[in-house]
Amino acid sequence: MKKLSLLTVKDLSQSFIDKTLYEDANFVLNKEDHMGVTGQNGVGKSTLIKILTGDIIPDEGQVKWQNKVSVGYLDQYAKLAPGVTIRGFLRTAFDELYTKEKELNDLYTKYAENGDDALLEKAGKVQTYLEENNFYDLDTEIERVASGLGLADLGFDHDVSKLSGGQRSKIILAKLLLQNPDVLVLDEPTNYLDVSHIDWLVDYLNNFEGAFIVVSHDYDFLGRITNCIIDIDFGTITRYTGTLKQALRQKAANRETYLKAYANQQRKIAKTEAYIRKNKAGTRAKSAKSREKQLARMEVLTPPKNNRRAKFDFPYVATASNLLLQTQDLVIGYDEALVKTAFNFSVGGSEKVAITGFNGIGKTTLLKTLLGQLKPIYGNYELSVTAKLAYFKQDLTWPNNNMTPLQYLQEEFERKKPKELRQALAKMGLTAQQAMSPLKELSGGEQEKVKLAKMQFEPANLLFLDEPTNHLDNDTKDALRKAIVNFPGGVIIVSHERDFFRGDWVDKTIDLEKLN
């Protein structure tokens, strides 16, 4: 019996600006597939998701979903209207059932007015429908999912328009999970989740009865949830079954074989071209002509992608102080205290300090307070007179997202020569073409690299890094870790990725959960 595929992708080709993302790619998603999508920054992972969800029409090829399959897509940028509570927003996952309940109440009201038994019969049917669809247990289900993702702590009456970036992502994810579609399509679902909520999501996905496709740079997470991988490389999409580790081993072997074949072909082409040039005129002209035809017919292998690896350091300003920052009974929050215990910690001249704790607990608020953007509720902090700060913001927002990375840096640093700015972007692994493309056309990872490039012109001795690993591929994360470790100054870093802190380079960890 043939497996019925939920999704069939045939001969898919897609170009973007000046590069081919994939050519003649084929893969299927079967009913039992828990699929991960891997590949370097900018190879077209998010573009593929947009093609699968119908947001982008592909240049060529077919994307065919099985009839009547419901597909749920995690849209990180969904609009959240002011005045709607968390509970109200999560209830919209069951709009149809709430409409039915309203219909039921209207039927009872009409029946009370005119006693028509036909209305009562109708109401009975609607009542049965609601019971069959577990309508009366919805709030319990909403609370289960919301608690699992850490939204319950905020209170269900909290206004959704006042949520932080991380909380926004969580509530959109919670609504999607409540809708319980046949197929889940998730693009970087762990970006704003902390360790305990990632664990909850792992359990949820492993017990999920439908299929899912997940793009993630968090390989620890992918390894725990997938049973097959599609990898984008060399302008094609390859499907691997089995664990992530097996897929990556197989990919490395395939890559090696491909690179050898590519190098051999390039040598052959160069040799043939030299022969043609030499013998175009003269006794061997005929033979040169036939070789020219051979070349024209040859299927040339796609050159390996420009996988420029990021290589950079954070610029340092010397300081004589051994102590860059000291807090005294610092209490942070907006209107009221976020963390029950006051902060008393210091950052030494070269200390690397990690701040951990679940989302919404106040990690970003702590950074903003220390940067002077928020007033403390109580207590204070002292910066060394010679402390010079640089800040990496968590969110991807730009003054104007039609600007190119080069224009953006030029506006920020008017005195710098374009050449210097270009070099800083190249150091991050961005190509000349990407430096000249509008920011909105770059992938999340490529935009993060622009933010890191900006920091190349902000000499400091104390770095504040808020979730700098979001959207970044493994190679860039490694380069970032190296740059932090090599930085002679102090660093305060917030990150939800366990893997990023591996090794023993962190001098102190401030766990906000333990302070509550």
Image: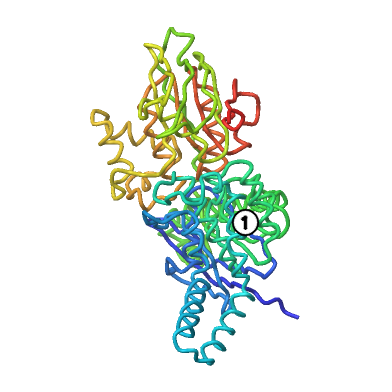
User: Residue 463: x and y, percent?
Assistant: 45, 25
In the image, 19 versus 377, the foreground residue is 377
Q: Is residue 220 above or below residue 209?
A: above
- The scheme the figure's colours follow is rainbow
The kind of residue on which mark 1 rests is: Gly
Q: Which part of the image, by quadrant, shows the N terminus? A: bottom right
Residue at 37% of width from left, 27% of height from top? 375
Q: Which residue is mark 1?
A: 36
Camera-side residue: 326 or 47? 326
Please say if 513 is above or below 26. Answer: above
Residue 212 position, x and y percent, is 62, 62
Spot occupied by residue 116 in the image (x, y as percentages of width and height)? 50, 91
Per the image, label 1 sits on a secondary structure element best described as strand
Given the current orientation, which residue lies at the most extreme top position?
320
Q: Which residue: 49% across, 47% down?
A: 167
Q: Find residue 364 and report its horizontal and vertical position in percent.
A: 46, 34
Report the number of discs: 1
| Residue ID at (49%, 13%) | 349
Q: Residues within 10 Å of mark 1 (few under 14, many from 20)?
A: many
Residue at the spot 63% in from the left edge and 36% down from the top edge: 499
Q: Relative to 303, is 143 on the left or the right? A: right
Figure check: 237 above or below 497: below
Is 187 situated left or right of 417 in this image? right
Q: Residue furthest right?
A: 1
Q: Quadrant of the C terminus?
A: top right
